[in-house]
Amino acid sequence: MDSEVDPDSPSAPGSDPSTHPVVALGGTFDHLHAGHKILLSMAAWIADEKVIVGVTGTCRADNEETCFLQNPIIQMTRF
């Protein structure tokens, strides 16, 4: 039995992913690296209208010993 692949199927090779009007994500994004850039690029790729990025400006309670390494929030959100 021959099986045809629906070109509009999300699993079809080379198909675009499903899109959403708004995509939201968040994190510290301190010391922006390749993984952050991929995450932000993928969010932009699947967003039809806008991407909302929340930037955490305080250290987590479970990671207080490395808080001094985090950049100030004003520096992390500067464009």
Image: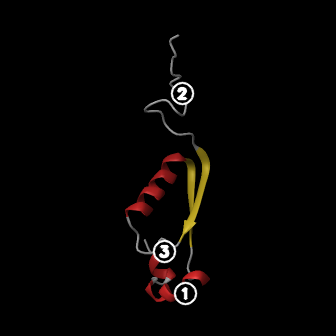
| Residue receiving disc 1 | 64
Most foreground residue, 79 or 23: 23
- Residue 35, quarter of picture: bottom left
Amino acid type of disc 3?
A: Thr
Query: Is residue 60 in view?
Result: no
How packed mark 3 is, by other alpha carbons closer than 10 Å (few <14, some 14-19, many 20 or more), is: some
Residue 8, numbered circle: 2
Disc 3 or 2, which lies upstream in sequence? 2
Amino acid type of disc 1?
A: Glu
Most foreground residue, 15 or 22: 15
| Residue receiving disc 3 | 77
Mark 3 → mark 2, Cα distance in angstroms: 38 Å
Name the residue located 59 percent from the left edge and 81 percent from the top edge. Answer: 62
Query: Residue extending furthest left?
Result: 34
Most foreground residue, 77 or 12: 12
Q: Nearer the viewer, mark 3 or mark 1?
A: 1
Position of the C terminus, as image quadrant, is bottom left
Query: Residue extending furthest top?
Result: 1
Disc 3 to disc 2: CB gap under 8 Å: no
